[in-house]
């Protein structure tokens, strides 16, 4: 009986690991791209189902062997994103967005399943490490109009990263949190202006739901920072309002909280100084 149970667990592990490898394109078939994409989509659906419905899988995800497969998949998809972005600076194909959007959809899918596996932190740290490199290419002037859809999807994915950090799903050092905000805030603000300038007829939009999601994630993240780092972020945000007239993302709520906390801290400091001065005089 015990041997049978072990066989079932092993079978489940093999099925789940195989589904993961195809879902994250670690393993691929030498078939037409359409068939490969269809297999990947089916594997992603299988992974989601097993994570939701299979009790054995919920135990398997704590095994180092399974975690190693996921971490390999994360590294691969980020490397693919960087390679495809970098290639645009050398050669701009007729449809430059196609491959990039596929990769970003894969990362978006990871944002959905990794929290269930308690591995979202691996993606967050990886994204923080490569954010500067991503934006160095994405902000290249000659690519402005050609990859507008990619830029919008980049913001959607980044919103999920900021959400994970801002709401405490992933704990990262305050320096990394500050860097994430300072790197992405100007890009997101400029992109919103660029997309709005395209008009309502454009196929690329940062709709109200996305904007509210980004703002909510950023407000939550700002409030987790030390006061001095908050001041830097608010300074950048207010410069954007003053120089470009763009208030998005609206950080007013976080700014008001920061002002209140700063005034309270200053008042407490003054009260403590007065108390110490009185005690000294009494002596």
Image (cartoon, grey):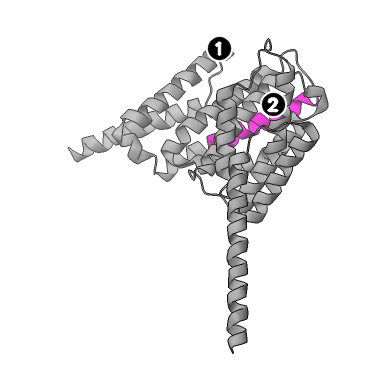
**Residue positioned most to the left:** 1
Mark 1: secondary structure: helix
Return the mark for residue 242.
Answer: none
Residue 188, horizontal then vertical, whole percent: 68, 32
The chief SS type of the magenta part is helix
Quadrant of the rendered structure where residue 151 is? top right
Q: Mark 1 and mark 2: span between their CA atoms?
A: 33 Å
Question: 131 or 240, which is in the foreground?
Answer: 240
Q: Residue at x 59, y 30 (%)?
A: 157
Q: Earlier in the sequence, mark 1 or mark 2?
A: 1
Magenta stretch: includes residue 75:
yes
Mark 2: secondary structure: helix
Q: Residue at x 74, y 36 (%)?
A: 241
Position above or below: 154 against 163: above
Residue 89, horizontal then vertical, whole percent: 79, 26
Crowd band around label 2 with a 10 angstrom C-alpha radius: few (<14), some (14–19), many (20+):
some
Residue identifier under label 2: 192
Position above or below: 269 against 184: below
Label pair 1/2, CB-CB below 8 angstroms: no
Q: Residue at x 70, y 21 (%)?
A: 195
Quarter holding the C terminus?
bottom right
Residue 1, horizontal then vertical, whole percent: 17, 37
Q: Is residue 186 left or right of 227 when viewed as pictured?
A: right
Question: 151 or 58, which is in the foreground?
Answer: 151
Residue 198, horizontal then vertical, whole percent: 73, 16
Q: Residue at x 62, y 73 (%)?
A: 273
Specify start and end residues of the magenta stretch as a single range.
72-90
Residue identifier under label 1: 34
Residue 150 in sight? yes
Question: 162 or 101, which is in the foreground?
Answer: 162
Residue 147 in sight? no
């Amino acid at each position: 009986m015990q041997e049978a149970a072990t066989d079932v667990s092993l079978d489940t592990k093999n099925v789940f690991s195989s589904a993961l490898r195809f879902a994250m394109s670690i393993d691929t078939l030498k078939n037409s791209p359409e068939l490969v994409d269809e297999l990947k989509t089916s594997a992603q659906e299988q992974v989601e189902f097993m994570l939701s419905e299979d009790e054995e899988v919920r135990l398997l995800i704590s095994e180092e062997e399974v975690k190693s497969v996921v971490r390999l998949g994360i590294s691969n998809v980020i490397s693919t994103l960087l390679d495809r972005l970098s290639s645009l600076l050398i050669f701009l194909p007729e449809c430059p967005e196609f491959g990039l959007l596929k990769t970003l959809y894969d990362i978006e899918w990871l944002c959905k399943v990794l929290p269930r596996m308690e591995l979202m932190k691996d993606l967050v740290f990886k994204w923080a490490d490569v954010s500067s490199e991503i934006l160095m290419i994405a902000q290249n002037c000659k690519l402005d109009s050609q990859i507008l859809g990619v830029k919008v999807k980049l913001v959607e994915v980044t919103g999920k990263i900021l959400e994970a950090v801002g709401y405490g799903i992933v704990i990262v050092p305050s320096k990394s949190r500050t860097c994430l905000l300072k790197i992405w805030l100007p890009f997101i603000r400029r992109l919103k202006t660029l997309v709005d300038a395209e008009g309502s007829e454009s196929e690329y939009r940062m709709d109200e739901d996305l904007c509210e999601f980004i703002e909510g994630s950023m407000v939550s993240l700002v409030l987790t920072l030390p006061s001095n780092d908050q001041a830097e972020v608010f300074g950048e945000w207010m410069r954007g309002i003053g120089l470009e007239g763009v208030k998005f993302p609206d950080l007013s709520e976080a700014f008001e909280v920061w002002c209140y906390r700063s005034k309270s801290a200053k008042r407490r400091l003054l009260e403590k100084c007065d108390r110490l001065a009185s005690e000294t005089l009494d002596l």
